[in-house]
Image: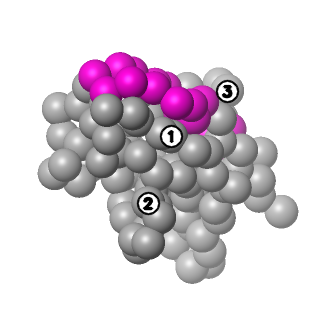
C-alpha cells in the first residue's frame, strides 16, 4: 500500500512563502507522474503542478512564476515551493502519485495553506 504524507502547510501573510513536502512510502521513480492539487472551500480540486519521471514540470497559469515543484529522489520526496502567496492560494493542498500501467492513483491526506490579506 502506497502512502503519501504531506506537510508544511501553515498560516502565512500575503506575499509570504511556504514549502510543502510530500514523502512517499516507496521510490518516487516508480510513479509516472507526481502532482500537487489544491481544493478551496466550495471549489473543485484543481491541478496546481505536476512532474514526470523525467523531471519535466507543468503548472497551472495562476501559479506560474510563483510556485516551483522539485524532488529529492534519495528522500522519496517532492516539494512545492510557494512564493508571493496570495489569499486566493488558500486551500488544502494534496499530493498525488500516478502509475499509468496499473491506472492507479494515490493521494495524501492534505495539508492546509491559509494566506491572510
Residue at 62 percent across and 74 percent down: it is 104
| Quadrant of the frame with the N terminus | bottom right
**Magenta span has 44?**
no
Task: Report helix, strand or loop for mark 3.
Answer: helix
In the foreground, 93 or 76: 93
Which range is magenta? 8-24
Mark positioned earlier in the residue sequence (3 or 1): 3
Residue at 40 percent across and 35 percent down: it is 115
State whether residue 31 appears in this view: no
Q: How many marks?
A: 3
Residue 112 higher or lower than 75, as above or below: below
State whether residue 117 appears in this view: yes
Task: Report helix, strand or loop for mark 1.
Answer: strand
Q: Which mark is residue 75?
A: 3
Q: Which residue is mark 2?
A: 40
Residue 81 location, x and y as percent? 40, 28
Q: Which mark is residue 113?
A: 1
22 on left or right of 90: right
Q: CA distance from mark 3 to mark 2?
A: 29 Å
Label 2 CA crowd tier, 10 Å (few <14, some 14–19, many 20+) = some
Amino acid at each position: 500500500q502506497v502512502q503519501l504524507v504531506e506537510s508544511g502547510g501553515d498560516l502565512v501573510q500575503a506575499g509570504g512563502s511556504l514549502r510543502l513536502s510530500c514523502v512517499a512510502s516507496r521510490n518516487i521513480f516508480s510513479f509516472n507522474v507526481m502532482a500537487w492539487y489544491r481544493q478551496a472551500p466550495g471549489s473543485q480540486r484543481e491541478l496546481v503542478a505536476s512532474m514526470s519521471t523525467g523531471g519535466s514540470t507543468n503548472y497551472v497559469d495562476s501559479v506560474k512564476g510563483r510556485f516551483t515543484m522539485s524532488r529529492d529522489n534519495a528522500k522519496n520526496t517532492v516539494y512545492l515551493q510557494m512564493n508571493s502567496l496570495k489569499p486566493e492560494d488558500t486551500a488544502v493542498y494534496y499530493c498525488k502519485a500516478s502509475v499509468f500501467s496499473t491506472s492507479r492513483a494515490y493521494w495524501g491526506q492534505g495539508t492546509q495553506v491559509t494566506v491572510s490579506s
